[in-house]
Image: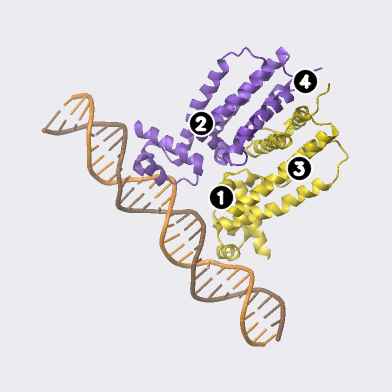
Chain colours: A purple, B yellow, C brown, D orange
Amino acid sequence: MKKKERILQAATYLFARKGYSDTPMHELSKMTGTAEGTIFYHFKNKQGIFLAILEDLKDTILPEFEQYRKVESENTGLDMVMETISFYLYMAKSREDLFAILHQRHPYELAVSNAECRDILEAIYNCFIDIFESAIVAGQADGSIHSAIVARKSALIVFGMVDSMVRFRMNNLYDVEALYSELIESCRRMLQSEPC
Amino acid sequence: MKKKERILQAATYLFARKGYSDTPMHELSKMTGTAEGTIFYHFKNKQGIFLAILEDLKDTILPEFEQYRKVESENTGLDMVMETISFYLYMAKSREDLFAILHQRHPYELAVSNAECRDILEAIYNCFIDIFESAIVAGQADGSIHSAIVARKSALIVFGMVDSMVRFRMNNLYDVEALYSELIESCRRMLQSEPC
DNA sequence: ATCTCGACTGAGTACTCAGTCAGTTTCGGG
DNA sequence: CCCGAAACTGACTGAGTACTCAGTCGAGAT
């Protein structure tokens, strides 16, 4: 089962950098040192490789997020949101390829016709949003976060805010590191309960 | 000059929906009712069409944003930011195809090697960010926006926040309309000056 | 020693693609 | 009406594409 893993790893690398359609199979075989036939011995077709990557993505990233979630923080809900932002940005950097794939059109297009793909994407996004949401709910309970906001919706907005930083970095648009502290402070002002 | 325009329009439609690599020329010719040769009579190659779309995008969207900017608002800077968010979301909806192209990997990849592409993207993003920035600066001057924030950085964050809503809609992830009022309020809390 | 079987190979297949080109049509000015 | 140029055509090319398949290989079971 060595070559199968190598193929999956190389495919993740290439799909992330060049996109699905712009990655020919022969490049995949060249990179892994396997014959093209071997790839089709392990996977039904090119799309099968992509689905395997998504499954792998779900099976490696989600447990890490769940693990993170279990580490009970003694901080306020507000601070938990900030920590989650840091953790998300950290993960997006260390698992660069996987997040790059999530920022391409291909998975979402595939999701329209492929239920498995749709389910995986849903699981991934739910995991992301749920963590932010539960931190916000905790914050509303402990008084650190404004009570008037709708937790789920604000979770989506915070997630979008952070994820757009990932997009900025991916497309070489802006220096995200330089924005980090402003991002954290913006988010804090956005969520914190009225100071008066 | 009728067919050239038709080709450009169809290419914008197809590139936005299927992506650059997944749009074959014969589909472009079928859609416009022109021979494939005609396309290459008007454009040097496929990439030439893409660059023409980007130029067109710059020449149609930026003037609309500049026009919007000139309409002097009598509101506070903070309200101007909110209006700009609405305007951006409105534009992203009415010019769906053009914004879809900006949310694909292709232009950014091309920008690495093609200076013209790089310049166009820079002009577009600068325009977006500048509008937010000047509204924030105005808000800091009139006291409606917190004085401690860095206008440019916050402009980037607000832009990222709004643009991520566009991404949500494009990828069928979440219902952006339902998030609108929460987005506006979040942004207001994020920017407004201390109530005390 | 022989058989079995899963992993692997790479030349081959049928097809698609961007781009070309020799030729035809359209059109405006003389 | 004619002429030249511009616009347009679609059959064609050759490079590439995903995928196939007949067959090799080596390790373990009989």
In the image, residue A31 lies at what x, y percent? 39, 42
Residue wearing tag 2: A95
Label 4: state its secondary structure: loop
Cα–Cα span, label 1 and label 2: 24 Å
Residue type beneath disc 1: Leu
Visible residue check, residue B67: yes
**Label 2: how many Cα within 10 Å (few below 14, some 14–19, many 20+):** some
Residue under the point 56% across and 35% down: A102
Disc 4 with disc 3 on a shared chain? no
In this view, the residue in front, A166 or B26, is A166
Quarter the C terminus of chain B occupies: top right
Residue wearing tag 4: A148
Residue type beneath disc 2: Arg
Disc 1 with disc 2 on a shared chain? no
**Label 3: how many Cα within 10 Å (few below 14, some 14–19, many 20+):** many
- The chain that hosts pointer 2 is A
Drawn side of residue B78 relative to residue A1, left or right: right
Q: Which of marks 3 and 1 is nearer the N terminus?
A: 1
In the image, residue B131 lies at what x, y percent? 76, 42
Residue type beneath disc 4: Ala
Which tag is nearer the camera, tag 4 or tag 2? 2
Cα–Cα span, label 4 and label 1: 45 Å
Cα–Cα span, label 4 and label 2: 35 Å
Cα–Cα span, label 3 and label 2: 34 Å
Q: Earlier in the sequence, mark 4 or mark 2?
A: 2
- The chain that hosts pointer 1 is B
In the image, residue B37 lies at what x, y percent? 55, 65
Which tag is nearer the camera, tag 3 or tag 1? 3
Residue wearing tag 3: B131
Which tag is nearer the camera, tag 4 or tag 1? 1
